[in-house]
Amino acid sequence: MRREPSERLKQVVDGRDLWSCARCGVSLYSVGGSRHHRQLRSQQPQPNLLNRPSNLILLCGSGSTGCHGWVHAHPAESYEQGWLVHGWDDPALIPVRYRVGDRFVMLLLDDEGGREEAS
């Protein structure tokens, strides 16, 4: 079973998120970042469901720095904003808060690499 995203999946997520941090909007070309599993690996009993576009977002930093570190250090708010998703939920059904330009929007992510504003 594959635990890490495929190269194709990485390209899909990077393109969908415009190589920018979902939480703060900074370009990852300048600061670096990582692909974050919204539904944590430890919470997903079926690893094949981890690596779907709806479950991955780009965040600046690593699991302990930048927005990626912030998400892990503040789980309550991160679940409210969709940056984390409970193991029993489907990430495709849980909106995630994105910084888009100078505003924040709640977006639903699909498993084809698309996103749309949640109603």
Image: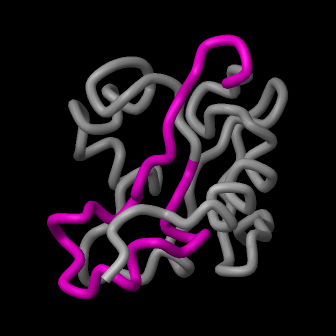
**Is 65 placed left or right of 113 in the picture?**
left
Indicate yes or no whether the magenta region holds residue 33: yes
Using the image, determine if residue 73 lies above or below residue 95: above
Indicate yes or no whether the magenta region holds residue 106: no
> Where does the image place residue 45, in percent across and percent down from the top left?
18, 84
Q: Quadrant of the N terminus?
A: bottom left
Where in the figure is residue 107, as x and y percent of width and height? Answer: 68, 60
Q: What residue is rendered at 49% in x and 67% in y?
A: 55
Q: Which residue corresponds to the image point at 37% horizontal and 75% vertical from the top-left?
A: 2
Q: Which residue appears at 69% of the width and 20% of the height?
A: 26
Compared with 54, 88 (above or below) is below
| Viewport quadrant of the C terminus | bottom right
* Nearest the eye: 100 or 38: 38
Relative to residue 43, is residue 58 depicted above or below? above
Is residue 9 toward the left or the right of residue 89 in the image? right
Give the residues in magenta: 28-57
